[in-house]
Amino acid sequence: MKRTYTLCIITSLIMCILAVGVHRVTRTEEKHLKVGFIFVGDEITPYTENFIKARNHVMEVYGDQIECVTKYNVTEDRIEEPLQELVAEKCDYIIAASYGYGPVVKEVAQEHPEIQFCVPTGDNANQEPVLSNYHNCYGTIYQGRYVCGVVAGVKLKEMIENGIITPKQAKIGYVAAFPYAEVISGYTAFYLGVRSVVPEATMLVKYTDTWSNYSIEKQVATELIAQDCVLISQHSDTIGPATACESAGGSIPVYHVGYNQSMTDDNQVVFTQVMTVLNQMVYCQKNGIDYASLTQAFNPQIDCHENILGKDMGSNYWYCYGLVMIIFMIIIMYGSMVATSVTQEKSNRTMEVLVTSVDTNLLFFAKVLAGAVAALIQSAVMLGTVLISYKINQDKWGGMLNMVLDIPANVLVVFALFGIGGFLFYTFIYGAMGALVSKTEDINKSAGGVQMVIMIVYFITLASLTDVDGIMIKVTSFLPVSSYSAMFARVAMGSVSTWGIVVSFIILVASIVVVGIIGAKIYRMGTLRYGNPIKLSNAFKSIKEN
């Protein structure tokens, strides 16, 4: 818990010090720097308080060399006016510390290239247009989350050892703000940390659809407690979940692992909040202002329409995850079927007649392509049935899958091209592996290595969905063994140049041809040899000799 707080502080400090430090290195002749800050809350909110502490520390370190101008309590839908005010005040750097500020800040950054803009926790800096004066920053918060999960696991283990709960009752509740990548990776890391100590632990996640709302967060935590959660954690900004744990009744105590900072004592915060409200009420009474009307005016019901700039990683993640899983299952299932078909023909001596009367290359390519066409037709029928059924019953489902099924046309095209290419690539390999054995029960020995490669590619791609600009997925998107899923994931979740897609696809097509030719030679050599399974090294040696 304290490490998460420390990590957040360090992240904020690094961001601010880098902003100032780089300026000092490149413009040493200037001794004065103006930095504008825009915060979604104030010192009452733990998330914002940590940024305030970081700002204050920078001011202490650099003294009169830096001037800070700060805007507090700026909601994400009202960012433009305070942002323009900081521009008018000729700030050298503007740091807007909330995820939802990103789209508007990037628009303003495009208009003012002389100012450096930064949105901590944002994710649109690498989306087109890429600007040299617009940046995102965020520390590896999931690492701190993992440590918090270990702490939570130690507490659960203590409760189990003391007989307070059984291992089956080790249930965690997680109050999450939005289904964004940073939130999902955070609670995933937290859960992995818990399970490293208590493998039997389970976790239930509920979203508040808001970053900072005390009442909603407390209510969601209360609902999780009612569902027998004995420990609560959160990725939201108020002390609501901690208060819910403190006031929970029942025979089993409910513990809380905090977010951003320690929440073990909230008396001062609650007192400040109450006194603020009382002061506002007294002011209204003295000046003849209706407090209820004023509150309603400052907290109106907002109806808004969201326009996604670039890629929406929150919604794209799920359909990308699903399509990667589908192509993985198709390759494994139908590739094994092709290998089995080849082995069965070999075992019943049908192959002896075929290879002596038909060109081996033609026979091998025809078999693989026929299997591929059958697989694609079957897959299309199954997926089409699901989609049509959902479309017919869409109203009954309440449109809950619309976000997942709303896939852009360009993404579907890339998925189709690379998916079919990857399927053909591995199907040729499976066909060749089937020719190396004489019994169907030996297929796993022959094709085991191929399946292992497919599994590794599958897990690497899924692990890289939250970091599509990472070096790992960039490399795998050009390798023929993995480009069928890695390149698709990059297109769906990030931004890839057209030449990159074309080069990757050319490499994949060329590899299919090469693998097909080699596979046909192995097929001819292997189909007429019976008995023990043929080692792949011996197969290549035999081909080379011939």
Image: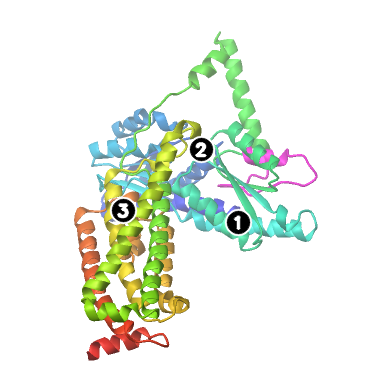
SS assignment at label 1: helix
Q: Position of residue 518 (x, y in %)?
A: 25, 78
Crowd around label 3: few <14 · some 14–19 · many ≥20 (10 Å): many
Q: In percent of the image, x 26 and y 51: which residue is there?
A: 27
Q: Residue at x 24, y 62 (%)?
A: 504
| Residue that lies at the very extreme toward the bottom in this rendered image | 545
Instruction: Tell me if residue 475 can be seen.
Output: yes
Q: Identify residue for label 3.
A: 415
Which numbered disc flags the more N-terminal residue, 1 or 2? 1
Residue that numbered label 2 is attached to: 211
Kindly state the secondary structure of the residue where label 2 is placed.
loop
Point 26% across, 45% down: residue = 128
Which amino acid type corresponds to the residue marked 3 in the rendered image? Phe
Tell me which numbered mark, 3 or 2, is placed earlier along the sequence.
2
Question: In this image, 165 relative to 416: left or right?
Answer: right
Residue 292 occupies quadrant? top right
Please tell me whether mark 3 sits on a helix, a strand or a loop.
Answer: helix
- Please give left or right for residue 58 compared with residue 91 in the image: right
Outermost residue to the top? 288
> What is the crowding at mark 1: few (fewer than 14 residues within 10 Å), some, or many (at least 20)?
many
Residue placed under numbered mark 1 in the picture: 149
